[in-house]
Image (cartoon, rainbow, N blue to C red):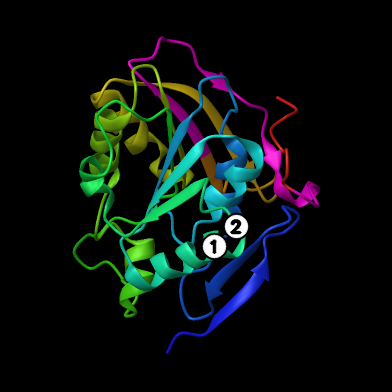
Amino acid sequence: MMKVVKNDLFDYGLEIYQNENLFKFSIDSILLAEFVENKAGLNTIVDFCTGNAVVPLILSTRVKAKIIGFEIQKDVFKLAFNSVLLNSLEDRIKIINANLNEALEYLLPESVDAITCNPPYFKVNPGSLINEDNSLALARHEIATNLEEIVVMARYILKNKAPIYFVHRPERLMELINVLTKYKFKIKKLQFIYSSYSKRAIIVLVKATKNGAEGLIVNPPINIMNYKTFKGIFEQF
């Protein structure tokens, strides 16, 4: 049974619907939305694996672009759709109930200025421990999509030289870089996030551009325990 609650979206002046029994958004999505560079010509952003639309909602406070989110799960899509209505952002944000591999049914090839993605973090291997709740399993494990499918679709819909932004687990960074390189994306920026500088990184943010030029920036590390708010966290770089 769905137990829907309405929460404040931290200090962004927005509200969001969440199901207490389903996968809730976390700091990963906030950092991803803040990591996107607000540059000229940013007219259309697509958010893959949008969940309850936290990334599109935050992006709407930072950029003027139209934002399109893809969410495969019907119940989660409803939360996202209703959160957009709740904040009167239906003229800025469109949520589509479809898997990202269906994106070309809704978008023209090479028509998108940027993509964001907070994908399922865990691979499905023999013996993998997968949550018995199907919704949580889809959110956490590569059941409905995987890194290669995400990058392939990104290559189809992104304009030339346009970026894709990922948030992921550091232990899968080399795999992500290899897949991006395979489909002719160049890694342009890396950001490692820590909960303590005496411990290993817990999050990595990656910007890569389609057919981009060589040149990688590695930002200084961030310890999230030093911040009371993540709004504008990357403006210092």
Is 92 left, or right, of 149 in this rendering?
right
In the rendered image, the vertical position of residue 158 relative to residue 57, given as above or below: above
Residue tagged 2: 88
State yes or no: residue 82 in magenta: no
Q: In terms of depth relative to the viewer, which is nearer, 155 or 138?
A: 155
Which portion, as a residue range, is magenta? 205-229
- Give the position of the C terminus as an image quadrant: top right
Is 237 left, or right, of 139 in this rendering?
right
Q: Position of residue 34 (x, y in %)?
A: 62, 40
Q: Position of residue 191 (x, y in %)?
A: 58, 33
Q: Residue at x 23, y 43 (%)?
A: 149
Tell whether label 2 touches label 1 (CB within 8 Å): yes
Residue 121 visible (yes or no): no
For the residue labelled by badge 2, is the local secondary structure a helix, a strand or a loop?
Answer: loop
Residue tagged 1: 85
For the residue labelled by badge 1, is the local secondary structure a helix, a strand or a loop?
Answer: helix
Q: In terms of depth relative to the viewer, which is nearer, 183 or 56?
A: 56
Is 236 left, or right, of 187 in this rendering?
right
